[in-house]
Amino acid sequence: MTDLTKYGPWALVVGGSEGVGSAFARRLAEDGFGVVLVARNAERLDAVADEVRARGAQVRTVPLDLLRDDAVDRLIEATADLEIGLLVLNAGANAYGAPFVTGDLARHEEVLTLNVLRQLPLVHHFAGPMVQRKRGGIILVGSLSGYNGSSREGVYAASKAFSRIFSEGLWVECRPDNVDVLHLVLGLTRTPAMERKGLKFDIPGVPVGEPDEVAAEGLAHLADGPVWIVDGNAETARRRSGPDRAKIVQAAVDAVSKIVGRH
């Protein structure tokens, strides 16, 4: 069980309307947390909220497009009366895959905004009180994509690399104040967002994570930061960080192409 006395009483799950985010919400509800759910799709958000309430937990929904200029202010206002002890930033599936040079720059900037420029002020705001209270936790959901550049998804990959390095520094800063920081690195995960992109989950040799298992692993290792790589993906991350990066990157690109059905 996730320690309610250290990480409670409320958990804020940004990107909580489906997939890994909703799995976090359900598990935290079962552990006694109140849960604030944030996502753009209000209908899916309400459906998850019903599941959370069915587990006996308090829940608050904040339908919000994080790309809005006032998104951070609106979210801070919506949670001003709550003690957020656990922040889970799960929003950030890549919504735009295109070559950088010939693609739409504004769409590339949206990826950066969602994964970096919204992450920083939210962590800054919610981590401050945790440090003052000397307890709390932060989970920043990352991706194996952050270990190598990728054609058509270079900005997304770079944003996940930023998040990983940012998490490491934040972990160092917050550790003396009993605040845990974890960058949770996901591999290929069977989420609705990935299914909508047309990814195939039956490629031999490619491990596939299930949302509930991924969320359970992240919560179980919250205190084992700064980085935790989801089971089955550590060797891939290690190889992508080694001296043969160029070959590994090309192999990764070829593998992704097969998964999305381009070859």
Image (cartoon, helix red, strand yellow):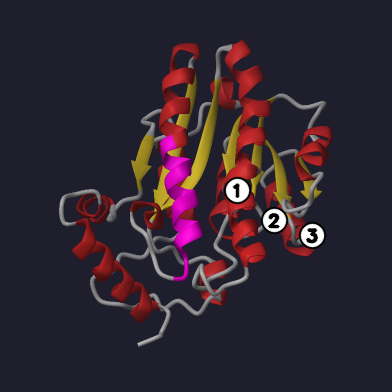
Q: Are the two marked residues, 2 and 1, in contact with CB atoms closer than 8 angstroms? A: yes
From the image, tell me which residue sits under label 3: 42
Can residue 33 be seen here? The reply is no
Of callouts 2 and 1, the N-terminal one: 1
Q: Position of residue 18 (x, y in %)?
A: 62, 60
Q: Is residue 149 above or below residue 215?
A: below
**Horizontal relation, residue 60 to residue 6: left or right:** right
Q: Position of residue 50 (x, y in %)?
A: 74, 54
- Can you tell which mark lies on residue 26? 1
Mark 2 and mark 3: Cα distance apart in space: 10 Å
**Span of residues in magenta:** 152-165
User: Which quadrant of the view contains residue 145?
Assistant: bottom left
Q: Residue at 72% across / 24% down in the picture?
A: 83
Q: Residue at 40% across / 52% down in the picture?
A: 146
**Viewer-closest of 136 and 27:** 136
**Horizontal relation, residue 48 to residue 141: left or right:** right
The mark total stands at 3
